[in-house]
Image (spheres, coloured by chain):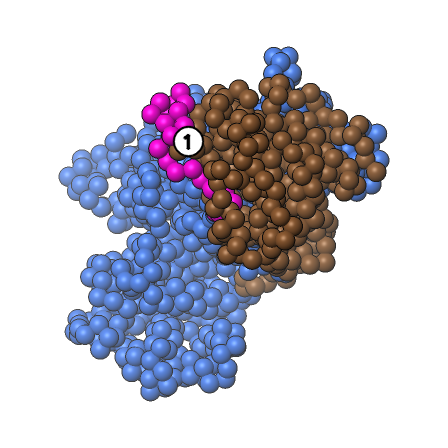
Amino acid sequence: MPTLQDYRGRHPAWCPGCGNFSILKSFKDAMIELNIGPHQFTIVSGIGQAGKFPHYVKCNTFNGLHGRTLPVATGIRLTNHEMLVMAFAGDGDCYGEGGNHLIHAIRRNINVKLFVHDNQIYGLTKGQASPTSMEGMKTKNQPFGVFSEQLNPMALAVALDCSFVARGFAGDMKHLTWLIKEAVAHKGFSLVDILQPCVTFNKINTFDWYKQRVYNIVPEYNPEDRIAAFQKALEWGDRIPLGIIYRNHRQVLEERVPGIKDKPLVRQPFDLSKIETTLREFY
Amino acid sequence: MDYSIKIGGEAGQGIQTVGDTLAKVFTRSGYHVFTHQDYESRIRGGHNFYQIRLADNPVTASRDGIDIVVAFDKDSILLHENELTENGLIIYDSKSLKEKRDKGNYLDVPFVDLAFEHGGNKIMANTVATGAVLGMLKIELNILFDIIKDTFMKKGDDVIKGNINAAAAGHEFALKNCHRCSFAVEALHAAPLLLMTGAEAIALGAIASGLKFYSAYPMTPSTGIMNYIADKEAEYGIIVEQSEDEIAAINMALGASFAGVRAMTGTSGGGFALMVEGLSLAGMTETPVVIALGQRPGPATGFPTRTEQGDLQFALYTAHGEFPRVIFAPGTPEQAFYLTNRAFDIAEKYQIPVIIIFDQYLADSQWTYDGFDLTKIKYADYRLRGDVFKNLPEYKRHAFTQTGVTPLGIPGDAKHLMVTDSDEHDEEGHIVEDAETRIKMLDKRLFKKIPLIRQEIGPPVFYGKEEPEIVIAGWGSTCGVMKEAVDVLLQNPPAPPFYKGELISPSLEKRGEGRFSYKTIAMLHFSELYPFPSIDKFNYLRILNNAKITICIENNATGQFARLMRAETGFDFNHRINKYDGRPFTVNELLKEIYSRLAQT
């Protein structure tokens, strides 16, 4: 069984008090509780403060380009579907730069776990609006306030029939650890949007702002009712639901690809001798 | 014997089926064939053609002068009538075209009526036309019948029988009624030849190299590669994923490569533009990947279905930052097959991106060969798998080594972690900011690998007379047409009509100025473009420097290869021939241009 010591990665370069520290701790706790060793999973990350996440975990890591976590994760997972593949991105990375990939990863239902550190602002580039910034929020680059409607990732995911849709909060580590474990256990593409204060740049959506609004979805709630889930996904403002918003049991992409039914692509040998026969087809 | 056949019609009329079938009949008869296609960016309508050259010796380009035009639309007559050779003929169906031509070089074959009467369905009109062309050439029908049986096997005996009868009816009609047919294609009884397009050759080369993952977004002229690989997906255990865009395509391929398999993507210039950041990512993370870049005329959407060599400089210099890359530009399907194999080997061996640059002309052209030599295929697995990886006492993904290459492990096969980053990183793959590591990493990725990669690069192909006075040079798809031009020019003095053509006026000739004193010619064809070939293996620079006339031939406007040559070697061609109308050179066109350059000298 792995211990916290096994997951001691590099020293984080995040601001003191950043919500990312709680996400990191919750994640490690989840991995330990699930008994998954550092070499048994791969994290793909992009650019932004969330992009640095795998360096602090100690695990197989592909820290690629801004917005492109999901295509890389898809390539890895299709090649080795015995490997747990997770993607870590920020709200700018995943919902802005990589929006198109999110839509299509949900459609494919590749069994990848996506965790979005959603602080409703751009941290690494120093405080510009992100797709989840609230309408009217003033920043250096949006001096008249944000004009665009705030993106609702939960409603978007439910609308696309995403296999697992959940929201966590960096301020409730116990709940977040549970959510991460649920997402990993679920078979299908999983989106966990994690609300997190940005202590340096987001002066509106502070820890207290979230704390006053978030509530845990009651156990009686049925996350497999898509219409109810859509209603739940629309909740924002005074009351923000945390927990599993929607879940379905769609077949995952890996099970549909005939060539990898018996064993992962990466374990399949290559046989040059067949080429001779194929060449005959050109005569 | 050397005949050219042009099948013309609207998109959707099945001219490709007729062309493919005829080409197959010829190659199975043991004849050499060269085909090329010209089509518009539409699914129905417009005017497309399929041109087949049929000869008893290898042919490597299309020539002007058509012997048989098969006209499925009026444009085929209007546009190609003046391309007919002296004894050339146009066959058409006056009822379908609603137009009757009474001149001698027309043969009216009732494609539709014969199809209906003998095949039972007018849909078989194309089969009638195919049979009629074979009748005009006096080629027996047994091979065509075999092809019909193979093609329609799934559709049942009635369809097979109908098509056989339709083909026979067209054949008989032509034999009986084509009084002006002077063609004679004797039965060779030779072994069938292999017939393959450039796109198929790249795809097959990739499969023969152990390709396991191909992700792409459809884009002409690269789609043929994806189609072929997808067709072989089940047989070879390959995953073909159609991505949401080209950015995803290259990133998926990089993910697959990171996870442990050989991965490839393919696109055209516009899609490649979207892949560029991913190309740079491959460079930084030292992730092997092969990219097939099929050029078409730009800028922007340009001529979506036509041909150009306009993206060489783009492929050479695109992507931010400095990292090694290899660029191959096959000139023939045979080169495409072997170079694709070498692309994979080099990508894996040095953990770099390798670009195979081609164009619509090569992608869609068919060439004939006796066969390919599979013993030339190289397959070495450079990855650390299973126990080999497990038993290593220590592993760092980007550890400094003598060669700059750190073997790639398979994530999950051992407790060793595979960590890589698009940020500058240390030996373990973690983000760093310090100058010292930066310099050492750049030395590892770039300067240590480059001399080794350079040694892998082969010299250009030399063809023609030793110590040539005239050298024509080119790269990629112009290989075949250059070779044919050299063959013609080697016959000295060159034969008419080129000599007496409009380019050299009779008055010039009278004064003797139209005659050339140069006797020896050769060509240099470059298919391994970058790193630019050194002169150690073959001193092509000596040949260029000793020649009196050097002409660089390119299917682009600005002479991108000539610029590369000058940048890499300092050598400046004294003439250039550039064609940028979106169409490939024919032999006659190229000869005219060469003669005009010689006349200027």
The crowd level at tag 1 (other Cα within 10 Å; few <14, some 14-19, many 20+) is some
Q: What is the x, y in percent for residue A33? A: 77, 40
B49 displayed left or right of B287 = left
Instruction: Say which chain is brown.
Output: A
Residue drawn at x 60%, y 55% is: A222
Is A172 in front, or is B341?
Answer: A172
Q: What is the x, y in percent for residue A113? A: 63, 44
Membership of A148 in magenta stretch: yes
Is B278 in front, or is B130?
Answer: B278
Q: Main secondary structure of the magenta part?
A: loop
Residue drawn at x 62%, y 58% is: A249
Q: Secondary structure at mark 1?
A: helix
Q: Is residue B579 above or below residue B373?
A: above
Q: Quadrant of the C terminus of chain A?
A: bottom right
**Quarter assignment of residue B389:** top right
**Quarter assignment of residue B518:** top left
Residue drawn at x 63%, y 53% is: A220
Q: What is the x, y in percent for residue A109? A: 58, 52
Residue B539 appears in the rendering: no
From the image, tell me which residue sits under label 1: B313
Residue type marked 1: Gln
Q: What segment carries the magenta color?
A: A136-156
Q: Is residue B178 above or below residue B565?
A: below
Label total for image: 1
Instruction: Say which chain is blue.
Output: B
B287 displayed left or right of A83 = left
